[in-house]
Amino acid sequence: MRGAASALALFALVAAEPATAATQPPRASPVSSEPNAPKAGEPVVVVLTLFGVGRAVRDVQVLVRGGGRTVRFPVIALGSGRYRTAITFPWRGGWALSVRYGRGSEIPLGKGAIRIEGVPPPANVVARAVALAFSDVGAAVYRSASRGSRAPPG
């Protein structure tokens, strides 16, 4: 009975999606992130879903802005509008989060901001963890993690 109710609810949601997608602005929603309490310098694996941006979305990346700096993180398409990435916040503080896609369109990721605590670990530890998490795009993520491990501006 519970399975039938879940299937019915899922069907209702899927059936309603085309009608609501046309009336609502595009949005990016995080589905999951590990760890749940990110710290500076530690990679956070994020799965997100894009809504209302069309079917064939290209050039998707996550942007984090803080301390006068923007860091870009590549994503892996998982299908059905879902994407996975590993974000490393270089230092503690407030960060704005967004998703850029297509020809420069940009929307907030979730609520659009996060506060990070903690002291960054050594850069080589971060880079290895990120490369392992995304071995299929390890080189690109490794470069992003290595660039993002510097100290905050003076």
Image (cartoon, helix red, strand yellow):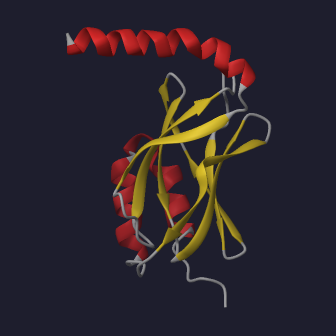
> Can residue 55 be seen at all in this image of the molecule?
no
Q: Quadrant of residue 25?
A: top right
Asked if residue 96 lies left or right of residue 25, the reply is: left
Asked whether residue 86 is in view, the answer is yes
Spot the residue most to the bottom: 154
Percent x, y of residue 55: 64, 19
- Seen in the picture, residue 75 relative to 58 is either above or below; the reply is below
Percent coordinates x, y for residue 36 in the rendering: 35, 57
The part of the image, by quadrant, that contains residue 70 is bottom right
Q: Name the image quarter holding the N terminus.
A: top left
User: Which residue occupies 40% across, 65% down?
Assistant: 38
Residue 110 or residue 63, whichever sits in front: 110
Give me the residue at 67% from left, 91% from top. Answer: 154
Q: Position of residue 148 (x, y in %)?
A: 55, 69
| Rendered residue at 67%/21% (across/down) | 21
For residue 39, side relative to residue 72 (left or right): left
**Pick the front one: 48 or 69:** 48
- Compared to residue 149, the image places residue 9 above or below, namely above
- Residue at (38%, 45%) from the top-left corner? 135
Q: Which of the pair 56/118 is nearer the observer? A: 118
Q: Is residue 45 above or below residue 26?
A: below
Q: State the image coordinates of residue 34 (x, y, percent, origin top left).
A: 35, 53
- The image shows a total of numbered marks equal to 0
83 sits left or right of 121 in the view? right
